[in-house]
């Protein structure tokens, strides 16, 4: 039942808003029409049929008094009726199908008061209503003008109600679409900003609640951009300030004569240098870069051609040609990080490119040791490493996958981990088409 209702109800806000406005109007129109038909129309039909029956009674009395000519003149001039007397004929059983409806029922009730055998035909109202009255051995045939029994004002009233409802429907659609236009702009700009693009401020327009939402989004956007700028400047400043003392330390170590102490200090300094390089790489992901159209197949192909294999076998399987938009340098850095991680622990790396309904997918499969399932989320945390010794000389700063996911998410995508069919780790990058 719920599924049927969900299928019937429109998914758009404007569709649901119109339903909320228009369905009660339809119900009111239907109820009003029903009540009008059962009360007002019934009363009007009763009065009209009683008036016709009274006039017919006058005509019958005139005919019974041998004043047929007078009856014909009065019927034609005053009663809007045309009469004809059919001599020596009896009314048989009703040759017309019984009509169901208020007019038929009321006419039947009114003619019954004449206490004479009768029949009537409502099949052709435009030509008039035919009424047959048995008078002794003759039949009085009466053609009653439709205006005597049928009031068009009632149906004009119903048509006006329907016409007004249709006008109200289009007015509601027009006004609601204008009110929802700022919401559509908000959705587009929010999607743009969520993909890491430089979205403009939203112009406040529309109802108070919509303007309040637009202002809240603009304030949120300003705060996020300010926070990102402060973080980038802080990391850049720290990295720059630490390089000077590290350089002095390297010069001092080169003058040391104790080789053992010298070797240990060089390890620590190299570790700090590796960490600073990672900070700089992280800061670069925040630097502005123009958006351009990217063929992912070509980008991955160039990386595989230029990367140092270090004994690893890299293969690419292309199921689709993937075209998207983004920052090419940042995406290249993200894919390089993934391949570097795989090379460190695996000998075979398989890259698969394909698309689905919503995203383009880049799978990186390797035959390495993999990552425990309970660590899938931890490896994306800054400075987290699976290496117990946290040996940064292996190239592990703990920021590689953090930077990668940050870049991918800034493009509106995501990174997911699972087990590879090669026995190691599968890293799946999802990017919007």
Image: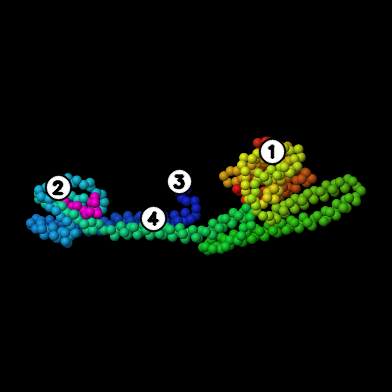
Q: Is residue 229 visible?
A: yes
| Residue at 47%, 54% in the rendered image | 15
Q: In which quarter of the image is residue 160?
A: bottom left
User: Which residues make up the magenta segment?
Assistant: 122-132
Mark 2 or 4, which is nearer the eye? 2
Write down the residue under mark 4: 26
| Residue at 65%, 49% in the rendered image | 294
Q: Between disc 3 and disc 4, whose residue precedes?
A: 3
Mark 2 or 1, which is nearer the eye? 1
| Residue at 22%, 46% in the rendered image | 97
* Few, some or many residues within 10 Å of mark 1 (<14, 14–19, 20+): some
Q: Is residue 216 visible?
A: no
Tag 3 near tag 4, CB within 8 Å: no
Name the one closer to the observer, 57 or 152.
152
Image position, residue 384 (x, y; %) = 72, 47
At numbered mark 3, what does the secondary structure look like: helix, strand or loop? helix
Write down the residue under mark 1: 315
Q: In which quarter of the image is residue 389?
A: top right
Write down the residue under mark 2: 91
* Few, some or many residues within 10 Å of mark 2 (<14, 14–19, 20+): some
Tag 1 near tag 3, CB within 8 Å: no
Mark 1 or 3, which is nearer the eye? 1
Identify the mark at residue 171; answer none if there is no mark: none
Tag 2 near tag 1, CB within 8 Å: no
Mark 4 or 1, which is nearer the eye? 1
């Amino acid at each position: 039942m719920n599924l049927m209702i969900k299928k019937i109800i429109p998914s758009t806000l404007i569709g649901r808003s119109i339903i909320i406005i228009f369905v009660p109007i339809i119900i009111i129109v239907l109820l009003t029409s029903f009540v009008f038909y059962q009360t007002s129309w019934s009363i009007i039909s009763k009065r009209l049929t009683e008036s016709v029956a009274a006039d017919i009674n006058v005509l019958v009395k005139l005919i019974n008094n041998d004043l047929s000519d007078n009856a014909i003149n009065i019927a034609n001039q005053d009663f809007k009726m045309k009469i004809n007397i059919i001599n020596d004929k009896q009314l048989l059983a009703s040759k017309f199908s019984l009509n169901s409806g208020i007019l038929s029922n009321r006419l039947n009730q009114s003619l019954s008061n004449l206490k004479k055998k009768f029949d009537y035909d409502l099949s052709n109202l435009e030509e008039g209503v035919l009424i047959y009255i048995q008078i002794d051995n003759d039949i009085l045939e009466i053609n009653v003008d439709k205006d005597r029994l049928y009031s068009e004002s009632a149906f004009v009233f119903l048509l006006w109600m329907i016409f007004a409802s249709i006008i109200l429907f289009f007015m509601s659609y027009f006004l609601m679409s204008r009110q929802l236009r700022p919401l559509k702009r908000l959705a587009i700009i929010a999607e743009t900003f969520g993909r890491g693009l430089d979205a403009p401020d939203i112009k406040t327009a529309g109802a108070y609640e919509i303007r309040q939402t637009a202002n809240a989004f603009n304030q949120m956007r300003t705060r996020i951009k300010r926070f990102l700028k402060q973080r980038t400047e802080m990391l850049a400043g720290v990295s720059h300030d630490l390089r000077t003392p590290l350089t002095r330390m390297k010069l001092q170590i080169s003058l040391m004569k104790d080789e053992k102490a010298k070797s240990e200090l060089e390890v620590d300094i190299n570790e700090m240098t590796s960490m600073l390089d990672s900070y700089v790489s992280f800061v670069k992901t925040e630097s502005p870069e123009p958006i351009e159209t990217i063929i992912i197949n070509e980008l991955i192909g160039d990386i595989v051609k230029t990367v140092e294999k270090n004994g690893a076998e890299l293969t690419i399987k292309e199921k689709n040609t993937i075209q998207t938009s983004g920052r090419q340098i940042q995406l290249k850095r993200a894919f390089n990080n993934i391949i570097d991680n795989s090379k460190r622990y695996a000998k075979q790396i398989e890259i698969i490119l394909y698309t689905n309904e919503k995203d383009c997918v880049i799978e990186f499969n390797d035959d390495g040791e993999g990552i425990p399932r309970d660590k899938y989320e931890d490896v994306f945390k800054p400075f987290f490493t699976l290496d117990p010794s946290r040996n940064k000389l292996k190239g592990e700063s703990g920021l590689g996958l953090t930077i990668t996911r940050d870049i991918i998410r800034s493009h509106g995508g995501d990174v997911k981990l699972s087990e590879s069919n090669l026995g190691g780790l599968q890293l799946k990058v999802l990017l919007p088409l």
